[in-house]
Amino acid sequence: MTKYIRHAWAFCALLLLALLANAARVQVVQAGSYDGNPANRRPTIARYQQPRGDILVGDEPVTGSTDSGQQLRYERTYRDGPLYAPVTGFSSQVYGTTFLEHAEDGVLSGSDPMLSPFPLWHDVTRGPRHVGNVVTTLNREAQRAAYRGLAGRRGAVAAVEPATGRVLALVTSPSYDPSALSGNGEAVTSAWARLNDDPEKPMLNRAIRQTYPPGSTFKVVTAAAALDAGVITDLDARTDSPDPYRLPGTTTKLANESDGCRDASLRAAFEWSCNTVFAKLGVDVGVADMTAEARAFGFNDTGLRIPFSVAPSTFDTRVDRAQLALSSIGQYNTRATPLQMAMVAAAVADGGRLRPPHLVERTTRRDGETITAYGPRPERQVMSAATAARLRDLMTDVVREGTGGNAAIPGATVGGKTGTAQHGVGNAGVPYAWFVSWAQADDDLEPKVAVAVVVEDASADRGDISGGGDAAPIAKAVMRAVLGL
């Protein structure tokens, strides 16, 4: 071979090596930057090139996909969209994803490497994605009962299984149909503007993202703190509780909406929701112990996820004695989500133990094979078992003889606590009606459900001491659905 042919051959070989090296650089080293470039529509096109995985309630999907025939081919559909919107959220080609659609997007879109039998080979070949399904913990009948009970009124319902933390119902009202946001046409942008401008805020997840003053339902926490701290040792002993009660360090006097609260026992005060007794109890317990008890129940927890984030419920830790008195009856800066108050009821029902709530039972491949199973999370002891037993007794009395009679269920033991939370400038707003409860069928070994209901636009008079009229019947319907009664 002549010299110049050898030189040409070596030069061509170098060019080939340089070409291969550049191709490797583009496809391996710089692949991420090209994938993430806003001008690159290939990932978006690939994302919608096949149907999305489904979200299931029981064995039935509440989501689906429809072929639009466009470049972004498959659009998301929802069955009973308004009913399940607080759980599913939406999956929009324009506005992204929320709630389970967002938290479990890897499984639903097929980008989770666990869905492929050979993840590394799948990454190299860039073959079709294997999408998966998400199975929720919801009880279909309980969800429907909560939605029917609210009947379009502003409010929310959360229900959990005390022994496991499984979320059985999560409803907010008013709601919306997530299907309206699925595509990418003018109808979607119009729906987005309309929903965001709606003063009723249908896209606000009131069950987990809205906090309210819990009012008298917070007295469950205050009673637990008083019992655990030894401030109260006998449920039926008279307390030193004046009526009205002058807030410490002020000239402001706190009154009750019912008679017979002066020096009332804890049992009577709980049954008839005496503000003066519980305000003084909170002061007697003190800031440190009240704060510790509230934190044990889940207040001031900024990390709760179910798997999407939950707005933290709050108990102010920097208060004077007057503010502590108001905080102890669920006013001042005390705020709670309905899910948090369902957790409070669940801890009482389960002997003082509390398991963090979870909404996803398992994720599966399309053929039903389980990828990940989510069992109960580790429990924590919120209060002593003796305190929980006493609180169960008190809550049972509320339903049997007190303000929560509308929640009574034949064939079951029901414990509850009513509440009416004042709010607005000078407490001029229509009170929020609250009810928290738990239920155990006569043939069950343990309570099966704990519920919290809040109704924002309740019809109760401002002088009404409870949410027994508006919220308790909704809780009753949910509990009956879970118990099968």
Image (cartoon, rainbow, N blue to C red):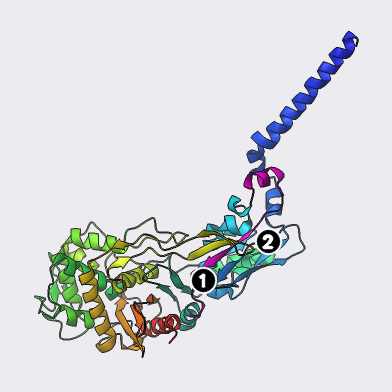
For mark 1, what is the residue? Answer: 202
Give the percent coordinates (x, y) of residue 44. 68, 52
**Residue in the image at 68% along x and 64% along y:** 75
Whether label 1 touches label 2, CB < 8 Å: no
Res. 70 mark: none
Looking at the picture, tell me which residue is in the foreground, 82 or 121: 121
Q: Residue furthest right?
A: 2
Name the image quarter holding residue 57.
bottom right
- The residue at 47%/61% (across/down) is 374
When asked about the image quadrant of residue 391, the answer is bottom left
Q: Which residue is mark 2?
A: 184
The part of the chain drawn in magenta is: 118-141
The answer to whether 31 is drawn above or below residue 298 in the figure is above
Q: Position of residue 265 (x, y in %)?
A: 14, 80
Element type at mark 2: loop
Which kind of residue does numbered mark 2 sit on?
Answer: Asn
Residue 127: within the magenta?
yes
